[in-house]
Amino acid sequence: MRWINQRPSKGAQVVLACLPFVLLGLAYLIGSAVRLADNPADKLLPSLQSMGRMIEVMALTPDKRTGDYLLWSDTYASLGRLWAGLGIATALALLLGLVIGVLPVARAVLSPFVAFVSMVPPLALLPILFIVLGLGEVSKIALIVIGVAPILARDLSLAALALPREQIVKAETLSASTWLIAIRVVLPQIMPRLIDSLRLQLGPAFLFLIAAEAISSDSGLGYRIFLVRRYLSMDVIFPYVIWITLLAVVMDLGLRVLRRRLYPWTELEGAR
Amino acid sequence: MSGLTIQNVWKEYGDQVVLENISLSIAPRSFVALVGPSGCGKTTFLRMLLGQEVPTRGRIDWDGTALPPEPGPERGVVYQRYSVFPHLTVLQNVMMGPEMRQAPLVGRVFGPARRKLADEARAMLTEVGLSGAEAKYPAQLSGGMQQRLALAQALMMRPRILLLDEPFGALDPGIRAEIHTLMRRLWNELPMTVVMVTHDLREAFTLATRIIAFDRTRNRPEERLRYGATITKDIAIWPPRRAGAQTLYDADIPPSQDDLTAFGLTSGTTRLPDGDIPDDATYPPHG
Amino acid sequence: MPTRRTSLIAALAMLGTLSLNASPAAAQARTDFKVAWSIYVGWMPWGYASDAGIVQKWADKYGLTIEVTQFNDYVESINQYTAGAYDAVTVTNMDALSIPSAGGVDTTAVIVGDFSAGNDAVFVKDGSSLADIKGRDVNLVEFSVSHYLLARALDSVGLSEADVKVINTADPDMVGAFQTADVTAMVTWNPMVSEIAALPGATKVFDSAQIPGEIIDLMVANTQVLADNPDFGKALAGIWYETATLMVSDTPEGAAARAAMGAASGTDQAGFEAQMAATELFDKPGDAVAFTTSPDLAKTMDLVRLFLFDKGLLGAGAMSADAVGIALPGGTILGDANNVKFRFDETFMKLAADGAL
C-alpha cells in the first residue's frame, strides 16, 4: 500500500501525537542529566525538581518584597496589556475593515494607507513609541495595537470584498440602506473571519507584548523572563515559556469555541 | 405608457460594445424569457433592469417614469447562486427584507411586530413548500430548496418586477420541474412582471408569455469589439398565456408533468436529458 | 522494527551530544582559547588589543591561539561564558558572582582592570538631592550594578528600596526614556551617564565615586581552564598591561589608541577620555595587586553578596549569603569553604608587576 493511503488508527493517532512531546521531554532530561552530572549547580538545563521548586516559589509563595504571588501578578499584568491591546486592535480593525470593505470612497482613501501601515515593522517603532508615549502601559498597548490592527483590518476588508456582489444587490432589493448592508449583511459574515484572524494574531501579539515588557516594566511575563535572564535562571524561564504557550493555546481554543457558538453556520458543509 | 419601456439602450465597457440599440416594451404581468448564447449580453440587460448596471445610453422607464439607478425593493431578484444569506436561518432570511424596511436604523424588529412578521414569513415559506425548514441554515438545504427560499425572500417585498438570472440552471431535472410549477403559480397569483434569463429554451417555453432572443448580428473577429448584441427574435407564445387565467397548456398538462417540450412527444418516449439539447435546436441560425 | 529503534536511539544520542557541546569547558591542556568582551570604557582595551595585533603578539609568545569576540549584549556574553562556550569574559565583580559563580561555574578573576569612580550615577529630575528620590519610580536595569548603586545610595541617606519603585528598563533606551515625562529618577552607567547629565532638568545626586572600589570591572576565566593552562592567564595579563599602558600614555600612539577606542564605543577621543576620568584604571599591575590584596576587597564583596542574596540572585537553593564561597588573596574565604566558586587571584597581575611575563 502506498504511504499516501496509510492512515493511523484512532489510538495510533494519539500515540503519534504524543511522540514529539515525549521525544522533546526525553532529550531535555538526558541533556539536563548530562550537564548536572558535570556541574550540580548548572543553570542552563535545570532538573525538573529545581524547576518544580521555582514554580512553587513563583506561583505559590508570596514575594518577600511585595507580598505578591509573582507568577499570578505577572500573568495578570501581561494579560491585562494583551487584552487591552487586542481589544482596541479588534475594534479598530472591525471599523476600518468594514468601512473599507463596504464603501468604495473609503476604500479609495484608506486601503493603500492601511496596506502601507501594515508593512511597518512594529518592533522598529518601539523606540519611537517609548519616547512619544512614555514607558508606561500606553506604549506597550499601543505596540500591540499597531502590530495587530492593520493586518486584521486588511484581512477583514478583503473578507468583506470577497462577499459575492449578488448578496449586496439582493440586500438592496430588500430595501437595505448602506448602513443596514454593513451591519446586517457584511458584519455578521466577517465576524467569523475576524475571530480566525485574531487567533492567528495571538502569536505576534504575545511577541509584541514580551518585547515591550523586556524594555521597560515592573511586572509581566516578558518582564520576568528578561529579568531572570540576567542571571541565567532557566529554572524560571522554562516554566514561564510553557505557561505563556499554554495561555496562548487556551485563548486560541477559546476563540475557536466562541466562533462555533456564535456562528454555527460557518461549520456547515457547503457554507461558503 | 404602462409596464417596462426600454428605449435605445446601449451598454459599453470602455471600447467594447456589449448591447446596441435595444428598444422594447414589456406589458405589465408579462413573463419574459431572455435567451441567447453565452456572452450575448442577456445577463447585462437583466442587470440594467435591476439597476445593478446603468445603461451607457438610452433609458428604461416603468409606467412612464425612469427606474431608479440603483437596486431597490420595487425590483426583486433571484440569482443562480448567492441569492440567500448564509449566516441567517431560513426564517431569518425571509424576514430580512420586511425587517429592514420597518427598522431602517437597526434592521431588526422586536415584540409583537416581530411575531406578526414571523407569521407572514411562515406563510410565505409554506407557499413555496419550505415549511418545517425554518430553523435551518441555507447550507443545510438542497439546491432546489435554496432557490425556493430565494424566491420566498424576494416575494416578501411584493416587488412589481421580479428578475430571475438563470435561477434554476443548476438544478436537477425533477427538482426543476417542481419549481417550474411553483414559479408559474406564483406568477399567476402575485401582481408582478417577471423577466427571466435562461439558457434553456425548454424552460423558456414552459414558463414565459414571450421569448426574446439576444445575439450578435455581426460576429466576425474584427467586428466583435465595435458591434454589440441586439434583439434578434421576439416570440409571443401562442396561444397566449395570461397571468391568473387558465390556458390551453395548463389545462392539458398532467399535474405531474409540466414540461412543455415533453408534451408534444409521443407518450412513453424518454425525455431528452437536461443540457443535452442539440445545437441546431437551441437558437435560430445567425442572421 | 529494529531499524526504527536504532534510528530513535541515534536521534536521542545526537540530541544528547548537542547538549554536551555546550557543556562547560572541559578540563585539559590546550592551545585554543575564546575570550568574550562587551563595550564598556574599562573593557575597550580588549577590542583595541585584538585589532592592533597585541592579542596576536602575546598569544604567539605562549604558542596559543586566542580568539577575541565582541558581544553587543553584555548579559549574553556572560551567559555564553557560563554555558561554557567561552573561556574568559569581561564582567563586573557583582555579575561574576551572581551569574557564573552562582551557576556553579568556578570562576577566577584574572585581571582587576578598573573600578568605577563616577561611571555609574543616580539622576533625579526636578530635584536637588538624593533624598528627593523618595516615593519616585526609578528606572534602571534591575539586578545590575545600577541596582546595587541605588541600594548603596539609598542606604547612605537612611532610605531603603521600599521607599522607591524600581522599573526595569533596557540600557539602550535609558537616554530616550529619561526625556519622557513619566521618568523622574534613573540609575545608569556610561556612556549614558554623560549624555543624561547634559540633559536639561537632570541632576546627578549620587555616583560611584562615592563608593570607590565597589563596582569592579574584571577579566574572569574558568578556574579549571586557568589551572590547566597557566599560559592563558599570562597571555591575558600581558595583553592587558601592554594595552593599558599604551592607553594612558601621553603620546601620539596613546592618543590614537584612545581615539580608536572612543570610535569603537560610539563616541570620540574627547568623550572617551571623559569616561576614562570617571574610571580608576589599573594600568600599573602593582596598583592592581595592591587593590586585590587589600582587606577592603573583602568588605566590598561582603556588601555585594548580601545585596545579591537579598535579591535572591545567589540561586533558589541559597539559604544564606554564605551559599557561594568567595576566595580572596591570602587565604581568606567568605561563605561556604566547600563551595568556593569565585576567586580573586593576584598571581598573573603579580607576574606582570614583577616583569616575569
Image: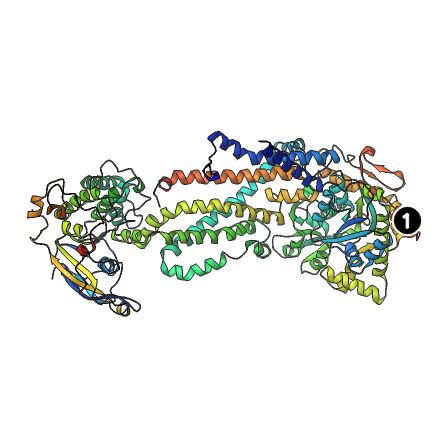
Q: Residues within 10 Å of mark 1 (few under 14, many from 20)?
A: some
Identify the amino acid type marked 1.
Lys
Q: Nearer the viewer, residue A231 or B275?
A: B275
Q: Position of residue B258 (x, y in %)?
A: 13, 44
- Compared with B67, C222 (above or below) is above
* Closer to the camera in the image, C113 or B215: B215
Q: Which chain is indicated by disc 1?
A: C
Q: Quadrant of residue A68?
A: top right
Q: Residue furthest front?
A: A1
Residue B191 appearing in the image: no
Q: Residue at x 80, y 58 (%)?
A: C49
What colour scheme has been applied to the protein in the rendered image? rainbow
The local secondary structure at tag 1 comes to helix
How many marks do you count on the picture? 1
Task: Tell me the residue that label 1 is attached to.
Answer: C350
Residue B92, how many percent across, how many down?
A: 28, 42
A133 with respect to A5 (left or right): right
Residue A129 position within the rendered picture, expressed as x and y whole percent measured from the top left:
57, 55
Q: Residue at x 56, y 43 (%)?
A: A78
Q: Residue at x 65, y 52 (%)?
A: C184
In this image, B260 relative to B104: left or right?
A: left
Image coordinates for residue B249, horizontal then vertical, percent? 8, 47
A12 relative to B90 in the view: left or right: right
Taking depth in this image into account, of A185 and B98 the one nearest to the observer is: A185
Q: Can residue C124 be seen here?
A: yes
Lateral position of residue B268 relative to residue A195, left or right = left
